[in-house]
Each structure stands twice: as structure tokens, then as C-alpha cells.
Amino acid sequence: MNAIPTPIRAEALDPGLFKRGMRRLAAGVSLVTTLDAEGPHGFVATAVTSVSAEPRPRLLVCANRASSTHPRIGATGRFCVNLLAEEDEAIARRFGAADRSARFAALDWVPLATGAPALPQALASFDCLVETRMEAGSHTVFVGEVQDVRLWREEGAPLLYLDGAFARVAREA
């Protein structure tokens, strides 16, 4: 008879080990944007996923509370998820840099239903109103009810993030 192993308590789990394990999960790269009286704000995210399609479409975004955009999403109650294409790596790097002043410069942005900025060169944009928020460790999970969807391009491959670096989809010939 096999003995049931004693579970490891979460407090004993090494956060570095957890992060190294999660780096093995390829994820799509998105820009999450919002708009307030001070202007547009945004950050790069890989923790974005659909929640439901019916009765109303919903998706979720996990935002680090240390992000400068986090309190603005909480205050405005709106955000837009822009799915980046492979050729948008430079944009992702710009939004991931510490200097926030140039994030929205030299790019065309379109306000959607909520007013949050959408990036027309993205693969798609999902404009959302915050329906639910839940604190989870260092992050807030924002569940958004989708108000508008734009499919900007018919073709293009998503920009991925894997093992601490941007990656591309390998296609079979």
C-alpha cells in the first residue's frame, strides 16, 4: 500500500522555484490599457484569459499591485486587452521598461466603447468594464465584462513569452 505523502505547506514553498516552474509555461503577450484624467496608462501582461462567452463575454487580467496602472484600473473600472503580434516585440519592450513617458508615443490608439485605448496594429482588442476584483497575493484579479471586440488583422501570429524571453510560434512546413 502506498503512503500518502505529507503535503508541502505553501509557506515552505520557495517563490523562486515557483517562478522558475511558471517560466516554462508559454503565454501570449498583451498590453493592458486604461484611461483617466491624467491620460493613458498601460502595462505588459501574460496573465490574461477568457472566463466565459455567455451570457456576456468575460475575461480576466492579473495586475501586480505595484504597477502604476493597477490603481487606475481600479479607479476607472475599465481596461482594454490588446493581443500583440510577433512583430510587436518592440512595443512590448517599451511598455515593460521603467520609463513610462514614451509608452504611448508614436503609436495610433483608438478609444473603444469604454474610452480605454486600443491598439489597431494588435491582433485583437477586448474593451472591458471591471465586473469583479479579487486580491490574490501581490496581484489583483480583475474580471472584465467585454463591451467591444475588434479583430484588427486577419493574419498574424501571437507574440509569446517563454522562459524569461519573448518567443515566436514555430510553424510546421
Image (spheres, rainbow, N blue to C red):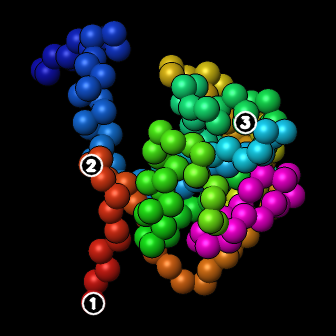
Q: Tally the marks.
A: 3
Residue furthest to the left in view is: 1
Q: Nearer the viewer, mark 2 or mark 3?
A: 3
| Main SS of residues in magenta | loop
Q: Amino acid at mark 1?
A: Ala
**CB-based contact (under 8 Å), mark 1 and mark 3:** no
Q: Residue at x 44, y 62 (%)?
A: 90
123 over 14 or under it: above or below: below
Q: Quadrant of the N terminus?
A: top left
Helix, strand or loop under label 2: loop
Q: Which residue is mark 2?
A: 163
- Tag 2: Cα neighbours inside 10 Å, few (<14), some, or many (≥20)? some
94 over 138 or under it: above or below: below
Pick the residue in front: 32 or 95.
95
Q: Earlier in the sequence, mark 1 or mark 3?
A: 3
Q: Earlier in the sequence, mark 2 or mark 3?
A: 3
Give, as a single range, the part of the protein colored magenta: 108-124
Q: Amino acid at mark 3?
A: Ile
Q: Which residue is mark 3?
A: 73
The spot of residue 144 in percent (x, y) is: 74, 44
Q: Which residue is mark 1?
A: 173
90 over 47 or under it: above or below: below
Q: Is residue 109 magenta?
A: yes
Q: Quadrant of residue 53?
A: bottom right
The spot of residue 130 in percent (x, y) is: 77, 39
**Res 124 visible:** no
